[in-house]
Image: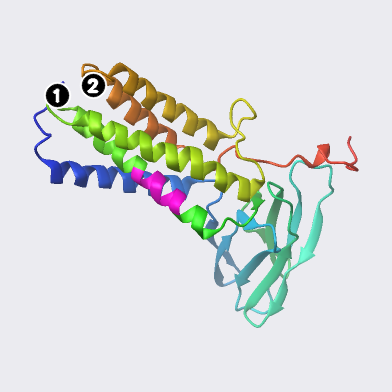
């Protein structure tokens, strides 16, 4: 394939931006830390809800609902995820039109599984049906680490997509863009990324060979793809297909929801935990 498109730089940058933004939005909205949203009808009132799936370790997780009908009450059922705990119940406390409850804070990578229920007379509903919500706690990450990490990873994705488009033209400068992609990806994924992980979960790297964290592993796989593309084209630009492959691999890796199969605390292995 040899498309004569490298001269249309503005169009190629525009397409790269669109692809990058679309993939970022998709990843954000499908990730396991994106809040659970919806609406449910209790009695005559339609009640919107938004439940957390991520919280920092230094505060309890707040669950709140706007419920105008004062005859409606509610409660939360929860337990620690991957534990031998029995289910606990805490009531939602009414403050005017708000029903509020708090889930106890956990150590970094600790999780709570919970469901929220509302009651009006003899009518009782679970707001998320039979599927409970999993809430993960993490340490607070300073903005001076997190913001550069996000920006640089975004730029690496943008450059990756731009490199793939450039590689469709044999006369393009895809080798130059490839080197920029690798540089930004190295800084965002392998320098700032582990720093974010350390603040959030007190571990620098939890992917291969130390664990199975999907975010770390997909970062590693994507980088290996780019290093291979560089190796095949290190002297002359003869294997543009590998550049396109590396970009598609990176896009596919980052379409996988962020934090899926991420760091997770196993309470059954903690000292003093009663095991079955």
Relative image position of residue 74 (x, y in whole percent): 71, 67
Residue 90: quadrant of the picture: bottom right
User: Dot 2: few (<14), some (14–19), or many (≥20) neighbours within 10 Å?
Assistant: many
The vertical placement of 132 against 218, above or below, is below
Q: Main SS type for the magenta part?
A: helix
What is the residue that sits farthest to the front in this orientation? 235
Residue 267: quadrant of the picture: top right
The vertical placement of 209 against 13, above or below, is above
Residue at 70% in and 77% down: 94
First reached walking from the N terminus: tag 1 or tag 2: 1
Inspect this view and state whether residue 144 appears.
yes
The label on residue 250 is none
- Position of the C terminus by quadrant: top right
The vertical placement of 128 against 99, above or below, is above
User: Dot 1: few (<14), some (14–19), or many (≥20) neighbours within 10 Å?
Assistant: some
Inspect this view and state whether residue 131 appears.
no
CB atoms of marks 1 and 2 within 8 Å: yes
Q: Nearer the viewer, residue 84 or 148?
A: 148
Relative image position of residue 206 (x, y in whole percent): 62, 35
Relative image position of residue 25 (x, y in whole percent): 39, 50
Residue 150 in magenta stretch: yes
According to the picture, the residue beneath numbered tag 2 turns out to be 240
**Residue range highlighted in magenta:** 148-155
Relative to 244, is 77 on the left or the right? right
Q: Which of 43 and 264 is in front in this view?
A: 264
Q: Nearer the viewer, residue 176 or 24?
A: 176
Residue at 40% in and 51% down: 151
The label on residue 170 is 1
- Position of the N terminus by quadrant: top left
What is the residue that sits farthest to the bottom in this orientation? 96
Q: Label 2: state its secondary structure.
A: helix
Q: Label 1: state its secondary structure.
A: loop
């Amino acid at each position: 394939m040899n498309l004569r498109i490298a001269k249309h730089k503005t169009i190629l940058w525009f397409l790269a931006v669109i692809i990058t933004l679309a993939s970022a939005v998709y990843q954000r909205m499908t990730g396991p830390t994106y809040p659970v949203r919806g609406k449910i009808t209790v009695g005559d009132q339609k009640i919107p809800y938004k439940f957390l799936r991520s919280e920092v370790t230094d505060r309890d997780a707040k669950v709140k609902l706007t419920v105008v009908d004062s005859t409606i009450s509610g409660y939360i059922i929860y337990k620690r995820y991957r534990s031998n705990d029995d289910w606990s119940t805490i009531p939602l406390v009414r403050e005017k039109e708000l029903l509020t409850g708090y889930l106890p804070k956990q150590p970094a990578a600790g999780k709570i599984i919970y469901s929220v229920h509302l009651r009006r007379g003899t009518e009782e509903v679970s707001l998320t049906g039979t599927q409970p919500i999993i809430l993960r706690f993490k340490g607070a990450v300073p903005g001076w680490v997190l913001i550069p990490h996000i920006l640089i990873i975004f730029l690496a994705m943008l450059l990756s997509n731009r490199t793939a488009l450039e590689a469709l033209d044999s006369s393009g400068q895809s080798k130059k863009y490839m080197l920029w992609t690798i540089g930004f990806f190295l800084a965002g994924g392998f320098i700032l990324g582990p720093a974010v992980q350390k603040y959030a979960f007190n571990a620098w790297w939890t992917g291969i060979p130390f664990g199975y964290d999907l975010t770390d592993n997909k970062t590693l796989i994507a980088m290996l793809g780019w290093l291979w593309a560089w190796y095949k084209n290190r002297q002359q630009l003869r294997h543009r297909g590998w550049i396109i492959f590396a970009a598609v691999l990176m896009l596919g890796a980052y379409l996988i929801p962020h934090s899926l199969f991420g760091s997770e605390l196993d309470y059954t292995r903690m000292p003093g935990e009663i095991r079955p």
